[in-house]
Image: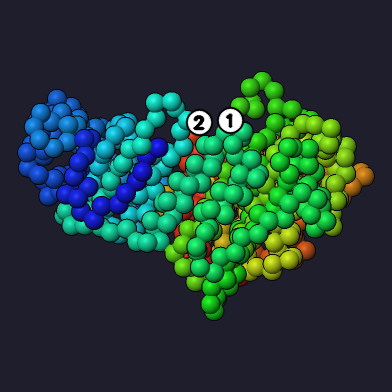
Amino acid sequence: MVELRYAATASAALRGAETVLLLAPQRALRKGWLTKTIDAPWADLLKRAAKDTDAGVAGTSVVAQNPGKGPKKIVLAVLPDERSRHNCPARPEAIASAVGASGVAGGPSAVIACAEEAAHVLPIARAVGRMLPTYSRKSNGKKSVVRLAMTNPTGGKQTISKADKAVVDRSRWAAMLVDTPPEEMTTTAFVSATRKAARGIKHLRVSVISGNAVLEQKMGGLHAVGRTALHPPRLLLLEYRPPKPRMKLGIVGKGVVYDTGGLSLKVGGHMAGMKCDMGGAAAAVGAALALADAGHKDAFVCAAGLVENAIGPKAYRPDDILPMHSGHTVEINNTDAEGRLVLADACSFVARKKKPDVVIDMATLTGAQLIATGHRHAGIVSNRGGLEDGVRAAGIASGDLAFPMPFAPEFFQNEFRSKVADMKNSVADRMNAQSSCAGQFIYSHIDDLDIPWLHIDLAGPAFREERGTGYGVALVATLARSLTKKMLAS
């Protein structure tokens, strides 16, 4: 386990550190950032080591071993000056790569980063925190501490706000949930972890609808997916009610704590790693906690649909017809398209019972998202152009990147045609914008309300290199801070 602490100054971060990582873009280094930030002897060590490398070239690192007092190893990572328009200007991916390669997670360490603008502080801290996982079951595992300090290009300090610290810390918490194996991270354990994390937060109330009560609330999809597992299906609710809120947000997450595929069994090695299928619920709850930690001005209700898609005598089957919360019926043609059933019921429940001004759902929903937008950008679908623009901007600002996919009900709803029910749960044509279609299925259960709606498919960015990333917490928290009624209207 790695503990991340925030240091006010570079010198404070260096105290007791055995390894130091310095992160700066090319232009800051050319203007002398290094000598303005660390003591001259260590800067000279790096300069001497740089003579044998391509130092100054973006993507390179300079490593110096220190024979004297202070840190034993000093690493300088050179970040690129430029970035494309669909990337975050703080270069979080380059920072994450440098942190991972530096070895700072292995002992008492310091990371000192050049934040060229105050707006870069959050994505830099988020990138560093992402590479310092908190879950480990290694027999030789030990706790280590990494101190993070940020400066501006002239060596002056850049401070991280309470709200941004909450986002980074809750992102790491969400990643920890994803990393926890399914024998530990059951639907019961998810609820317990959330209750513990929410303890003492003002204006926040946690409640749970569990087992047969889920069915009594007419959430037939959520109940069917989880009903045969040892731990029952649950709808976890976090309701935040600050004084005089401007609006109310609905945040919904898919929490399939393990996905076997059900009777449509995942085969050929595709089941391993499916502990990540609750990444949407982890991100939704993490974002809710981060907003509440910081005393967010708007009210919200966060719902996590928690199930294990297991196999057993009560398992739902292909050809079953499920009654959904929306009143629609769904013919099952693929039990491995289970997340949309969970989300459709949870979104309908939140939209109809809690009456928010906007519904945002988050899910590791489709493998097709990786084909559409890749490992780093979540795919988004929205029925409001202003909301779509807002989440793209929030992604650029936070480093949790997102890119829009088509919203076109007239093109995609027919993919779910059924002769015996209102719709099927999986598409007829897998080559027709699968990720947009999956989002369309969810929307079809709240489309009669015409409520502003945003779907975030984070299958790629939520789980990379066999680790949870905590993706989505920073994206939704940043979006929530900037959300306006005008954004929801267009």
Measuring 60% from the left and 69% from the top, which residue is drawn there? 248
Q: Earlier in the sequence, mark 2 or mark 1?
A: 1
Quadrant in the picture for the N terminus: top left
Gap in angstroms between the C-alphas marked 2 and 1 = 7 Å
Q: Is residue 475 left or right of residue 148?
A: right
Element type at mark 2: loop
Read off the residue under disc 2. 466
Please tell me whether residue 184 is drawn above or below residue 159 in the rendered image. Answer: above
Q: Residues within 10 Å of mark 2 (few under 14, many from 20)?
A: few
Percent across and percent down for residue 411 are 74, 49
Tell me where residue 51 appears, x and y as whole percent: 12, 28
> x and y percent of residue 266 in the render?
70, 27
Quadrant assignment for the C terminus: bottom right
The amino acid on which the numbered mark 2 sits, given as a three-letter code, is: Glu
User: For the residue labelled by badge 1, is the local secondary structure a helix, a strand or a loop?
Assistant: loop
Q: Is residue 135 above or below residue 436?
A: above
* 292 sits to left or right of 216: left
Amino acid type, mark 1: Gly
Which label belongs to residue 273? 1
Name above or below for residue 210 compared with residue 205: above
Marks 2 and 1 in Cβ contact (< 8 Å): yes
